[in-house]
């Protein structure tokens, strides 16, 4: 998700093309559309492809990017001075080199925030796996925790144990991305 979102963000932030602002507003308007509105058509689409009860419906849409992540990265990329683009062009950089060698390293803080947000959201996602996964052996952690809570009895000990264990990957990603976040702040300082 970060790869596709960063490419789209770069295009919206740095490239000039006809209809760019209208496309950006259209993309932003999808944030206001609740996911529940598109739930049934997307489910029918994946069901007709025979992909229900697999992880594909959970992973495939994420490769296309997130409007919120695109907005976040675009806003950050717009704060990078355009003089850096001009200097890179003088040195012979094309669009891809400008993106990969200049903009991406300077956008490390925003990418760190996006990585933390994206991983936390998808790790704790309950609705997507509930809709697309039917077999117990495919259940994600939130669905497994829900299975411990039923109307007869609740296994509070098991629930607390799973909740504690499920925090470990989130903490690892947070502290890893936090290191790059701080490192990106130090590296991206523009000296005048």
Image (tube, rainbow, N blue to C red):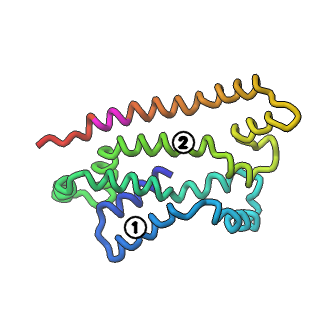
- SS label for mark 2: helix
Q: Is residue 117 left or right of residue 73?
A: right
Q: Nearer the viewer, residue 29 or 69?
A: 29
Residue pointed to by mark 2: 119
Residue interval drawn in magenta = 181-185
Q: Is residue 34 left or right of residue 54?
A: left
Which x, y percent locates residue 89? 20, 59
Q: Please state the total of marks drawn on the protein image.
A: 2
Look at the picture and state if 57 lies above or below 124.
below
Q: Nearer the viewer, residue 32 or 64?
A: 32
Q: Quick check: is 182 in the magenta stretch?
A: yes
- SS label for mark 1: helix
Overall secondary structure of the magenta section: helix
Where residue 122 sits, quadrant-wise, is top right
Q: Is residue 171 left or right of residue 106?
A: right
Q: Quick check: is 175 in the magenta stretch?
A: no
Mark 2 neighbour class, 10 Å CA radius: few under 14, some 14 to 19, many 20 or more = some
Residue pointed to by mark 1: 24
Residue drawn 74% across the image and 54% down it: 131
Which x, y percent locates residue 163? 67, 29
Residue drawn 51% across the image and 63% down it: 32
Point out the tag, 2 or 1, that comes first from the N-terminus: 1
Residue drawn 33% across the image and 46% down it: 107
Indicate the quadrant containing the C terminus: top left, top right, bottom left or bottom right: top left
Which x, y percent locates residue 17? 32, 73
Q: Is residue 48 left or right of residue 125?
A: right
Look at the picture and state if 98 lies above or below 183.
below
Give the CA separation, mark 2 to mark 1: 24 Å
């Amino acid at each position: 998700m970060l790869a596709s979102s960063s490419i789209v963000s770069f295009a919206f932030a740095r490239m000039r093309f006809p209809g760019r602002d209208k496309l950006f507003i259209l993309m932003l308007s999808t944030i206001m559309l609740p996911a529940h509105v598109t739930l049934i058509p997307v489910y029918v689409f994946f069901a007709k492809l025979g992909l229900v009860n697999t992880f594909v419906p959970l992973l495939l849409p994420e490769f296309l990017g997130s409007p919120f992540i695109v907005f976040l990265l675009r806003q950050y990329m717009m704060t990078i001075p355009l003089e850096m683009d001009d200097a890179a062009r003088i040195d012979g950089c094309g669009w891809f080199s400008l993106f990969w060698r200049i903009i991406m390293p300077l956008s490390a803080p925003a990418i760190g925030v996006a990585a933390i947000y994206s991983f936390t959201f998808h790790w704790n996602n309950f609705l997507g796996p509930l809709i697309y996964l039917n077999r117990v052996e495919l259940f994600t952690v939130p669905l497994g925790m829900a299975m411990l809570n039923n109307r007869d009895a609740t296994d509070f000990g098991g629930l607390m144990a799973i909740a504690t264990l499920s925090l470990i990957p989130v903490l690892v990603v947070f502290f890893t991305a936090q290191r790059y976040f701080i490192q990106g702040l130090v590296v991206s300082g523009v000296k005048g």
